[in-house]
Structures are given as structure tokens and as C-alpha cells.
Image: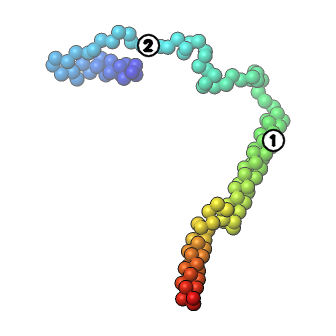
Amino acid sequence: IVFPSILCDIILSQHPNIRQEGEIAKKRESALNLHYKLFSEQHVSDIAEPSTKATSAPMTRNEIIAALEAHCKELDEKKLQFEKMIEALKHEDVAEETDPIVGNVDAGNDVAGNNVDDDAEDEEEDSGTSGSASV
């Protein structure tokens, strides 16, 4: 809200003939309202964490190398964790493809083109009709 007001004030002060006849600038109560938390340092933790290291002296070449090696080691550990998660997910996918869900036997049979329930019902009907015909 403040930026457009400032921008309009600058433009109107540099080019006063932009206004049409009868137009007047609206006066605002205060030019800029600032929240007290901006000055109380309570919002800083949301934006950035305070540094615990003193950065008065620059790091030596050996310190930089040691820090980079430690960082690489951490990244390697994270990479291994991700690779393990990927492998576990792949194994789950393979297990699901080879072993259909136990509670969903009909779905597995329908995919294969075999409907066990329909075949069993057809056999019962055939045996029922053939049994009555033979009697």
C-alpha cells in the first residue's frame, strides 16, 4: 500500500498536468505505518538463523577443505538413505505386480481374463441341468 502511494506521489509531483480537471489527490492519514514487531527482533528467527560462529577471521585453506569433506560425507549419507528408499519402493512395486492383493482376488483374475466366480456358477448350472435331465 505504501509503495504505490509513494510512486503516485513521485509521478504526480514530476508531471502535475496528468490530472484531469476536478481530480484531487486523496490525503492519507499517515504516510507509513510500521508494525512494532519489525523493530523488536521477534521476526528475525523466521527469516534467518543467527550465526553461532564468529566470522572475524577468514578460514584457512585446510579448514575449507575439512569443511567441504565433512559436507560431502553428510551428502553421501543422505544419498545412501535416498537410494535405500528407492530400492524399498521398487521392491514393493515388484511384490505388488507379482502377488495380487489378497482381498482383491477377482481383480487379479479379471486382469488375467479368468473370472473364477463366473466359471464356478456356470459349472453349478451345468451340473444342475444335467442332473435333472438324467433323473
- Residue 69 numbered mark, or none: 1
Disc 1 from disc 2: Cα separation: 49 Å
Label 2: state its secondary structure: loop
**Residue drawn 54% across the image and 15% down it:** 38
Q: Quadrant of the C terminus?
A: bottom right
Give how far across and how far down residue 4 sits, in percent: 36, 23
In this view, 125 is above or below 53: below
Circle 2 sits on which residue?
33
**Which one is closest to the eye, mark 1 or mark 2?**
2
- Residue 104 numbered mark, or none: none
In this view, 43 is above or below 121: above
Question: Looking at the picture, which amino acid does disc 2 mark?
Answer: Asn
Specify whether 20 is left or right of 110. left
**Residue drawn 66% across the image and 65% down it:** 100
Is residue 5 visible to us here? Answer: yes
In this view, 109 is above or below 24: below
